[in-house]
Image (tube, coloured by chain):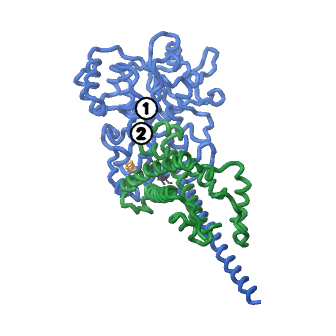
């Protein structure tokens, strides 16, 4: 089945492409009609729970079949490919040898400790396991573009949480960041990957922010477009979950998280966490989970002091304790001064009395 | 006998600075603890006032800097240097001990080393405070700053921690203001310009 112009424009709604400008849509539609060759994609998974794959497989419009048959040509994907054993690993070896251009999708973080032995894919001729680290380096070097899919690939995510026993690193720490596009999110959002792949295929690199995320998806904070924002502005906060108000006090990370959830929701626009009564957990933020320290339901701006492992300063507590200590110190000092002046006066009186 | 110690310009900018600082701390605390300290009505109001005073204090700092370096050229009065450390220790000894035994107050230049330290640190700490503040205000425009602090979560964290620093040093400043010839001597001096002669 070929994706026609009409199909595409229909699908654009499901992709949340309304945010993309319409001249762009027309161009995409035209380009798809011209029938560009499908772009080969190699998708490797490291330290991941395959949740990002799961999320992308759930894309409804266009269906995953449309994507695989019309936009890309998926050469390798550990969890969905039918082949196994050598048949499957040979695809990777061939990709390294051939001159065919491809896009590399990396899902999951890359463990680098002990030469990366904590995550391997296949073996070499001598039967030695090949590390994920090596695959990312080698394939990354050959690839035209590299997509770091999901929070683990973008920031390190859960595998990089303290104490990070495997030395998990984001993709940009392994290969030349200039090639990489980051699509953070736990999981990554289907329309981000589909949109990005279509853009890479048709127009090349999209406009990125300083963290190499496509501006079209990550230009605004959740908090900027949140439907609970009027409650935030008024200071009307939910005290319990599922109260339909701003969930700032329940630990909402909307104010520090870039993503487009408020615009397009999840499950094809059905719902999204905040409408469902759960605060944003900041799954696409740099500070998600242990990687740099904000607990899911911890109030902002609580964080660990970076650089000092294990030292967790709850900003609120710190403020209260230091403030109270200062007030206490001042009161003690003032009382001391008052008492000593009184004593001095009495002494003066006594000396006069003599 | 009273002596004239504080010219008009430093007195005016001192109170402007004080007012801005207090308003910034209060509006900031409203933003931080909206459930405890909602004194400005709504968060939008608190944020709005926070920015107004942020801009005011920036110009106030600029004006004061210009005054001390180019008009009065008395910046040596307020800059803390290595050589001030022994004096600082003497002063601390006085505050923690001598003041209770009514020992004579150690004599220094126009400002004592403790004051010099405070008046030098405040503008320095103000730099990260205002950078993190602007990063929270316009995170896209100041994405470089956000990167330095590795994410908006930390930007906010440090903005708050620095606020705590300001709050406690302000409390200390207000309290030490009562250690003049009389409890209100220094306060009156900052208003009229005249203080008891030393
Ligand atoms: C100099 C320029 C400053 C700017 C542009 C600025 C800007 C901001 C912004 C945008 C926020 C809102 C955070 C948010 O809603 O996400 C904020 C919060 C805050 N500001 Fe400032 N600020 C400045 C200076 C100060 C100063 C001097 C203080 C106090 C000494 C201060 C104390 C606070 C506090 C306590 C918060 C609450 C942060 C939290 O949630 O913990 N700010 N500021
Ligand atoms: S629920 Fe979260 S994102 Fe929405 S307005 Fe409140 S703090 Fe912001």
Q: Is residue A308 above or below residue A57?
A: below
Residue A301 position, x and y percent, is 50, 50
In which quadrant will I find the N terminus of chain B?
bottom right
* Residue at 57%, 61% in the rendered image: B5
Q: For mark 1, what is the residue?
A: A209
Q: Quadrant of the C terminus of chain B?
A: bottom right
What is the number of callouts on the image? 2
Front-most of A312 and A121? A312
Q: Is mark 1 within 8 Å of ligand 1?
A: no
Task: Name the image quarter holding residue A233.
Answer: bottom left
Name the chain letter of the residue that bears numbered label 1.
A
In the rendering, what colour is chain B?
green
Taking the view exactly as shown, the residue that stands out farthest to the bottom is A353
Q: Residue furthest left?
A: A6
Foreground residue among A190 and B159: B159
- In the rendered image, residue A265, in percent from the top left (x then y), is placed at 33, 40
Element assignment for label 1: loop
Q: Nearer the viewer, mark 1 or mark 2?
A: 1
Q: Colour of chain A?
A: blue
The reply to whether dot 1 and dot 2 touch (C-beta < 8 Å) is yes
Residue A167 appears anywhere in the view: yes
Tell me the CA gap for discs 1 and 2: 11 Å
**Residue at point 73%, 63% (across, down):** B93
Q: Residue at x 50, y 31 (%)?
A: A153
Neighbor class of circle 2 (other Cα within 10 Å; few <14, some 14-19, many 20+) is many
Q: Quadrant of residue A214?
A: top left
**Picture disc at residue A258:** 2
N-terminal-most mark, 1 or 2: 1
Residue B157 visible, this orientation: no
Residue at 70% over, 48% down: B82
């Amino acid at each position: 089945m070929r994706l026609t112009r009409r199909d595409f424009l229909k699908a654009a709604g499901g992709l949340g492409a309304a945010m993309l400008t319409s001249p762009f849509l027309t161009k995409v539609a035209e380009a798809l009609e011209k029938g560009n060759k499908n772009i080969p994609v190699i998708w490797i998974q490291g330290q991941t729970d395959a949740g990002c794959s799961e999320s992308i497989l759930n894309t409804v419009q266009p269906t995953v079949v449309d994507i695989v048959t019309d936009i890309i040509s998926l050469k390798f994907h550990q969890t969905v490919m039918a082949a196994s054993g050598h048949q499957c690993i040979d695809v990777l070896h061939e990709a390294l040898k051939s001159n065919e251009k491809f896009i590399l999708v990396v899902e999951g973080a890359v463990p680098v400790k002990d030469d990366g032995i904590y995550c391997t894919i296949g073996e070499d001729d001598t039967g030695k396991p090949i590390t994920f680290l090596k695959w990312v380096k080698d394939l990354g070097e050959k690839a035209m573009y590299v997509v770091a899919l999901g929070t683990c690939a973008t920031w390190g995510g859960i595998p990089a949480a303290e104490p990070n026993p495997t030395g998990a690193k984001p993709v940009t720490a392994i290969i030349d960041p200039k090639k990489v596009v980051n699509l953070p999110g736990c999981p990554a959002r289907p329309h981000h990957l589909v949109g990005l792949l279509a853009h890479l295929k048709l127009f090349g690199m999209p406009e990125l922010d300083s963290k190499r995320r496509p501006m079209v998806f990550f230009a605004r904070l959740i908090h900027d477009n949140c439907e609970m924002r009027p409650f935030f502005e008024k200071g009307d906060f939910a005290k319990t979950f599922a109260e339909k108000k701003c969930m700032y006090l329940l630990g909402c990370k909307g104010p520090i998280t870039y993503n487009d959830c408020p615009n397009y929701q999840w499950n094809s626009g059905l719902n999204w966490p905040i409408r469902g009564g759960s605060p944003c957990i900041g799954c696409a933020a740099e500070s998600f989970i242990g990687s740099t320290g904000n607990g899911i339901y911890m109030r902002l701006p609580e964080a660990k002091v970076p650089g000092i492992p294990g030292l967790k300063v709850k900003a609120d507590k710190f403020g209260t304790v230091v403030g109270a200590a200062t007030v206490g110190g001042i009161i003690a000092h003032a009382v001391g001064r008052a008492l000593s002046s009184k004593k001095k006066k009495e002494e003066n009186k006594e000396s006069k009395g003599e | 006998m009273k002596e004239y110690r504080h010219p008009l310009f430093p007195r005016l900018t001192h109170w402007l600075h004080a007012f801005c600082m207090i308003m910034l701390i209060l509006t900031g605390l409203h933003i931080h603890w909206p459930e405890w300290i909602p004194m400005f009505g709504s968060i939008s109001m608190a944020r709005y006032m926070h920015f107004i005073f942020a801009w005011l204090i920036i110009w106030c700092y600029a004006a004061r800097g210009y005054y001390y370096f180019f008009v009065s050229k008395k910046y040596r009065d307020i800059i803390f240097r290595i050589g001030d450390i022994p004096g600082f220790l003497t002063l601390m000894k006085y505050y923690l001990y001598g003041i209770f035994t009514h020992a004579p107050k150690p004599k220094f230049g126009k400002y004592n080393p403790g004051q010099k330290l405070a008046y030098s640190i405040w503008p320095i700490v103000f730099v990260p405070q205002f950078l993190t503040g602007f990063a929270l205000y316009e995170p896209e425009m100041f994405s470089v700053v956000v990167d330095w602090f590795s994410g908006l979560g930390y930007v906010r964290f440090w903005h708050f921690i620095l606020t705590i620093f300001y709050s406690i040093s302000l409390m200390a400043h207000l309290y030490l203001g009562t250690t003049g010839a009389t409890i209100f001597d220094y306060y009156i001096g900052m208003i009229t310009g005249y203080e008891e002669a030393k």
